Image (tube, coloured by chain):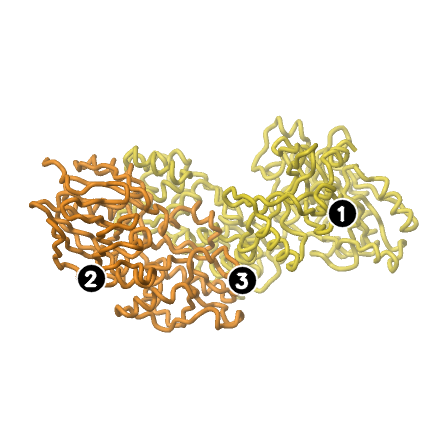
């Protein structure tokens, strides 16, 4: 547990993606099997020990520590698991620090009644950081800011391969992944992903630069709506049915309403949406269904999940990915007609003759549950990743608002000496109400200028937050608005970023809240 | 239990010893002062007469120059000095270079003012010596059972491992200028780290004083004279304020590290956006505080600056007459 505890500890303090990758690759390089495999399983969420409830851990510590001292300590530290980890009276030499493999193996095989003694024996021998990491592992919530995709990316980086190569075989291997590591180290065969309902890495589109249209022939392209949900893949193989996010994370457990339908022998690419009586609900409704391990019948009923199909990658064991889009689309339509699933429908094609005509259609669709238009070459094969040329997304132009900088906060990592997080507001009568927070969109040079401006115009500090004079106008671009009772303004922005610094514009000429409320109505 | 000695009193300005006519670590300028160690909240400027170790006097002279005290008297550890009706002896406190406990004797009673102290080995100063006494005045900076400082060698090993994870970044270690910085330098050398170590200019004077008293740091270099690109993989020791300061921009993507006992609590480390918290403290941890009460065997214990409540609770349970000594003007937080 020593190396794994230090890894979790370091990850929990590491704000940057690259920093996390460096920590993970170093760990994979330095740690032997099977510990690194179990660690990988824990980080990718493939383990579900959930053996120890926080109450059990609390009970154990209360047998050993004075009640008043525990209360004073808990009040100071604020986190139960951390307090227990720190306050546990160590008995060095009483036991041996177990390996990750031992912790997982014994946690899985030890019954409920023997578990407290097992934990206490470990805790006696461990350091505070090791106890903290063990509690995290046993209660099933690592929360160190590492997604399954990031862990797999680190594995790929360490092995000198592409993350998609890992995804291809991921569902054919199981913890502690000795066959996977053997293959990556050149000591074994590639694990065979056939018949395991494996994920196929998805194909993504580049953003369209409208100047590109001049050199593109409309006859080569097919258009369809870019629906405002999340991209998913449904895989049915040998009686198994799985649902993956676009990064290959299995999310099926939270969508029984989708997977309980008829058996499927196909791999389908589509958009996950909430649809009620044929109408796509706003993204906020879908968000209620995301990032859950399970779902209640009530929520599944009030927020029914639906998949709008874009593509057919595998049918009856035949890999169609090398075929042209037009052929795959024909097969998709035929498959849907034959095997129609009640919770799936086809993403309709949008016929057009010229770019002007498509631009007019696109302009007329603003405000519906679409983000823009997808353009796909009729002859394009399905290639994992983001190849340049075959697919484009032609998103709606972002909304813009002129807002006044109100508060700034220091960033993390490289930006920890910079004020790089900006809270901005718009006018409601005579006062400014905050409407969002942005921390990107500007260049490094602009960041320096903003940082210098904040330091010069700071008026008050609230912990890490610095209030500034209400003088500087920022042009903020965003994708949409939602009502939010959590914000004072009642409005939350999607994907806000600083698009321009309006050094020239007086604050009094910034936008009013009415401008945003109109957008909500429309 | 005999009553507590009544000839040392907390008054505005510090601890006043009437039969000796002096204060211990006064928080304002006084006629006569006994100073336990050189940290600025204990060693202030402008006293008439100062008694301290030679090292502490040197630190005060670095900081205050002429204002370090009109009449400065150095005492060796263990040397008895008579002031008025009181015998004062300085004994090692193990906190920083020159740090001492003030042992005060009067009419057959003995009071020990510990100042700040720790019980761990520190390559820059002699270890704390427990002295049997009637009244023991202890600090309580880390007086909660969640504070158990780990082995400092493990913390240094973690710092050095960070170099292998981020070879292209500099490691910026925030450490208090007096004591912590020099201890880290020595611990790095003991761990076999023999590359040059880069230091912030504000450490120069204190480092020179430590050298004068025989502490060797090996090859130290100023950050200013080195190219940014050449600082990749190097270790820089600087005051904690530099972690979030523009000064750090002269380093390549610095990894913010902070050496302090407070780093034991994750929220504290996160608050300062530290990536590598190093739990290295110059104060006694919970176990050391409690062990020290046993070692000095004083029936009466006064607890000052820090988490008094928890230590008093634990001491009372073990039969000590313990009470909080509320003195103004000391920093609970600085470490």
How far is mark 3 from mark 2, CA to CA? 42 Å
Query: Can residue B72 be seen in this snapshot?
Result: yes
Along the line of sight, the residue nearer the viewer: A172 or A203: A203
Along the line of sight, the residue nearer the viewer: B155 or A54: B155
Same chain check for tags 2 and 1: no
Q: Position of residue B332 (x, y in %)?
A: 34, 45
Question: Mark 1 highlights which residue?
Answer: A311
In the rendering, which numbered label is found on residue B249?
3
The chain letter of the yellow chain reads A
Which residue appears at 70% of the width and 40% of the height? A272
Question: Mark 2 highlights which residue?
Answer: B74
**Among the two numbered marks 3 and 2 on one chain, the one whose residue lies closer to the N terminus:** 2
The chain letter of the orange chain reads B
Same chain check for tags 3 and 1: no
Mark 3 or mark 2, which is nearer to you? 2
- Quadrant where the C terminus of chain A is found in the figure: top right
Q: Which quadrant of the figure has residue A232?
A: top right
Residue B152, placed above or below residue B323: below
Q: Chain of mark 1?
A: A
Q: Secondary structure at mark 2?
A: strand
In the rendering, which numbered label is found on residue B146?
none
Residue A301, placed above or below residue B52: above
Residue A36, placed above or below residue A275: below
Q: Position of residue B12 (x, y in %)?
A: 28, 41
Callout 2 environment at 10 Å: few (<14), some (14 to 19), or many (20+)? some
Q: Secondary structure at mark 1?
A: strand
Which residue appears at 78% of the width and 42% of the height? A335
How far is mark 2 from mark 1, CA to CA? 86 Å
Q: Position of residue A273 (x, y in %)?
A: 71, 37
Count of numbered marks = 3
Q: Chain of mark 2?
A: B
């Amino acid at each position: 547990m020593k190396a794994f505890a230090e890894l979790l500890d370091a990850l929990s303090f590491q704000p940057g993606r690259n920093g996390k990758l460096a920590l993970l690759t170093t760990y994979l390089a330095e740690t032997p099997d099977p510990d690194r495999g179990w660690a990988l399983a824990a980080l990718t969420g493939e383990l579900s020990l959930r053996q120890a409830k926080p109450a059990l851990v609390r009970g154990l510590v209360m047998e050993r520590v004075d009640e008043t001292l525990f209360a004073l300590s808990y009040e100071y530290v604020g986190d139960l698991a951390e307090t227990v980890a720190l306050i546990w009276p160590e008995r060095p030499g009483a036991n041996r620090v177990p390996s990750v493999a031992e912790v997982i193996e014994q946690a899985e095989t030890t019954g409920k009644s023997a578990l407290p003694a097992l934990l206490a024996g470990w805790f006696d021998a461990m350091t505070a950081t090791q106890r903290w990491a063990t509690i995290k592992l046993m209660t099933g919530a690592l929360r160190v800011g590492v997604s399954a995709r990031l862990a797999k990316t680190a594995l790929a980086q360490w092995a000198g391969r592409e993350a998609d190569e890992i995804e291809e075989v991921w569902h054919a291997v199981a913890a502690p992944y000795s066959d996977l590591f053997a293959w990556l180290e050149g000591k074994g065969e590639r694990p065979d992903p056939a018949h395991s309902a494996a994920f196929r890495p998805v194909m993504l589109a580049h953003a369209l630069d409208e100047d590109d249209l001049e050199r593109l022939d409309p006859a080569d392209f097919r258009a369809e709506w870019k629906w405002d949900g999340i991209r998913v893949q449904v895989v049915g193989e040998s009686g198994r049915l799985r649902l993956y996010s676009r990064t290959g994370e299995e999310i099926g457990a939270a969508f029984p309403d989708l997977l309980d339908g008829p058996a499927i022998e196909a791999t389908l690419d589509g958009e996950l949406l909430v649809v009620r009586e044929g109408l796509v609900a706003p993204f906020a409704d879908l968000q209620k269904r995301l990032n859950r391990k399970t779902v209640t019948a009530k929520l599944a009923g009030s927020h029914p999940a639906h998949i709008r199909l874009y593509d057919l990658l595998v049918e009856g064991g035949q890999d169609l990915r090398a075929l042209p889009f037009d052929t795959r689309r024909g097969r998709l339509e035929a498959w849907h007609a034959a095997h129609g699933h009640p919770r799936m429908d086809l993403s309709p094609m949008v016929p057009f003759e010229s770019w002007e005509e498509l631009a007019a259609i696109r302009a007329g669709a603003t405000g519906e549950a679409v983000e823009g238009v997808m353009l796909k070459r009729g002859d394009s094969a399905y290639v994992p990743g983001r190849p340049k040329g075959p697919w484009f997304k032609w998103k709606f132009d972002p909304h813009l608002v002129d807002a006044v900088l109100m508060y700034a906060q220091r960033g993390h990592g490289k930006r920890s000496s910079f004020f790089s997080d900006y809270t901005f507001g718009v006018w409601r009568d005579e006062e400014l109400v905050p409407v969002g927070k942005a921390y990107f969109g500007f260049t490094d040079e602009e960041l320096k200028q903003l940082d210098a401006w904040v330091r010069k115009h700071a008026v008050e500090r609230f912990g890490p937050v610095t209030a500034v004079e209400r003088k500087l106008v920022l042009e903020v671009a965003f994708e949409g608005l939602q009502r939010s009772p959590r914000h004072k303004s009642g409005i939350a922005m999607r994907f806000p970023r600083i698009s321009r610094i309006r050094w020239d514009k007086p604050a009094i000429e910034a936008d009013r809240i009415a401008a945003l409320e109109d957008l909500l109505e429309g | 239990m005999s009553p507590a000695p009544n000839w040392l009193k907390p008054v505005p300005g510090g601890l006043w010893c009437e039969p000796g006519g002096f204060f211990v670590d006064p928080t304002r300028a006084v006629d006569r002062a006994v100073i336990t160690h050189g940290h600025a909240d204990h060693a202030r400027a402008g006293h008439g007469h100062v008694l301290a170790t030679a090292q502490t006097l040197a630190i005060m002279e670095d900081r205050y120059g002429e204002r370090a005290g009109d009449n400065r008297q150095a005492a060796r550890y263990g040397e008895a000095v008579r002031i008025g009706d009181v015998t004062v002896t300085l004994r090692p406190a193990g906190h920083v270079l020159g740090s001492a406990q003030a042992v005060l004797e009067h009419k057959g009673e003995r009071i020990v003012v510990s100042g700040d102290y720790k019980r761990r080995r520190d390559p820059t100063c002699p270890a704390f010596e427990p002295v049997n006494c009637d009244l023991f005045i202890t600090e309580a900076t880390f007086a909660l059972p969640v504070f158990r400082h780990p082995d400092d060698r493990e913390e240094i090993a973690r710092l050095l491992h960070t170099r292998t994870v981020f070879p292209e970044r500099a490691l910026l270690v925030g450490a208090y200028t007096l004591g912590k910085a020099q201890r880290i330098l020595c611990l790095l050398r003991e761990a076999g780290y023999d590359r040059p170590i880069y230091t912030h200019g504000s450490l120069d004077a204190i480092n020179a004083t430590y050298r004068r008293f025989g502490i060797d740091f090996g090859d130290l270099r100023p950050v200013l004279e080195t190219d940014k690109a050449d600082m990749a993989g190097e270790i820089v020791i600087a005051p904690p304020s530099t972690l979030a300061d523009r000064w750090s921009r002269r380093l390549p993507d610095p990894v913010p590290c902070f050496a302090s006992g407070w780093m034991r609590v994750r929220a504290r480390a996160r608050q300062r956006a530290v990536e590598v918290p190093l739990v290295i403290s110059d104060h006694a941890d919970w176990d050391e505080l409690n062990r020290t009460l046993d070692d000095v065997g004083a029936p009466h214990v006064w607890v000052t600056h820090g988490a008094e409540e928890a230590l008093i609770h634990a001491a009372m349970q073990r039969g000590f007459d313990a009470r909080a000594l509320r003195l103004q003007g000391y920093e609970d937080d600085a470490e």
